[in-house]
Image: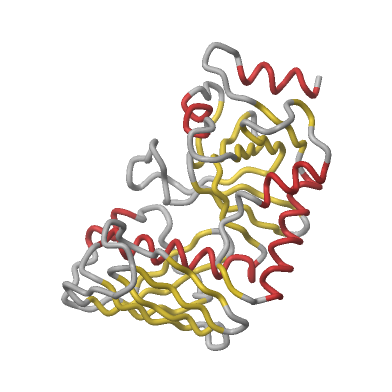
Amino acid sequence: MLRLSIGNVCIEIELPPTWGAGNILERFAGFWTVRQPDFRLLVNVEPGLEIKGFSTEELGVQRIWLEEKRALLAGFDIQGEADLRTATGRLRLDANPNTLDSALRALFIILLPRHSGLILHAAGLQRKGAGWLFCGASGSGKSSISRSLRDGELLNDETVCVVRRQERFYILSTPFWGELEATPGSPRISAPLHRLVLLNPEKCGLLEPMEAFLGLLANVICPAGGDRANFEKIMDLTWGVVQTAVSQGLVFDWTTDNWGVLDEMVG
């Protein structure tokens, strides 16, 4: 059994004995744990698996659907179900480690709001001991601002976790990288939330709470479906982030000292 921990959630993974775990151990190095699991996942590998109705050009999870006590995930080469009452799930997938990677990411998206956490489409950085979130659409500058960091540490350039612990919010690294993938085995990093920056917003400068809330909410990765309780948790956590952080808007510009611009906004 392998136990993978991201944010406040630990998933125990049971792989078939015929499928070597070497690549998976390396892929998620730094995120394995011995803590008690919050969810147990049984994985069945079926080489050549094809699920009808999904694009053959995209492997991994293409659809996540969440009901009150049940979640479904599916794609061309994967099919799975999670029972949230018993905290157990089953996966059928093709013999492709990247497909398992996609399924695990989907499961953390489903489970984290129930454990005071969110998965965000954002870059996370630690600078002078404080956590910074940079949210925006693809191409808005998340990886670029990450490359420009000189006096801090990168948590992730594409996908980060935000959790609430004892009424404080923290940004945590994840193994789901974008362009700047870290060396396998990079340690988990966390930083107390301090700044929220929306890249290429309609307004540059300091943002009003509702402006920041709507911009951040657009970058919360969440499943479709009719689970009202999950929706309310996501809204509450998103508002909590906005209430905690100094919120700013920025248009990234390679010719400008973007960090200097952000610092000048708050004096």
When the figure is inspected, residue 235 is found, relative to residue 204, above or below; the finding is: below
Left or right: 61 in relation to 131: left
When the figure is inspected, residue 20 is found, relative to residue 27, above or below; the finding is: below
**Which quadrant is the N terminus positioned in?**
bottom left
Q: Residue furthest bottom?
A: 86
Q: Residue at x 36, y 70 (%)?
A: 2
Q: Quadrant of residue 28?
A: bottom left
Q: Residue at x 47, y 83 (%)?
A: 88
Q: Residue at x 43, y 65 (%)?
A: 4
On the image, the x and y values in percent for residue 112 come to 59, 65
Q: Residue furthest front?
A: 53
Observer able to see residue 22: yes
Q: Residue at x 73, y 61 (%)?
A: 235
On the image, the x and y values in percent for residue 103 come to 39, 66
Residue closer to the observer: 171 or 129 = 171
Residue closer to the observer: 178 or 154 = 178
On the image, the x and y values in percent for residue 188 come to 48, 49
Left or right: 70 in relation to 240: left
Q: Quadrant of residue 84?
A: bottom right
Q: Residue furthest top?
A: 255
On the image, the x and y values in percent for residue 114 come to 64, 71
Observer able to see residue 153: no
When the figure is inspected, residue 242 is found, relative to residue 105, above or below; the finding is: above
**Which quadrant is the C terminus positioned in?**
top right
Left or right: 51 in relation to 214: left
Residue closer to the observer: 246 or 229 = 229
When the figure is inspected, residue 233 is found, relative to residue 134, above or below; the finding is: below
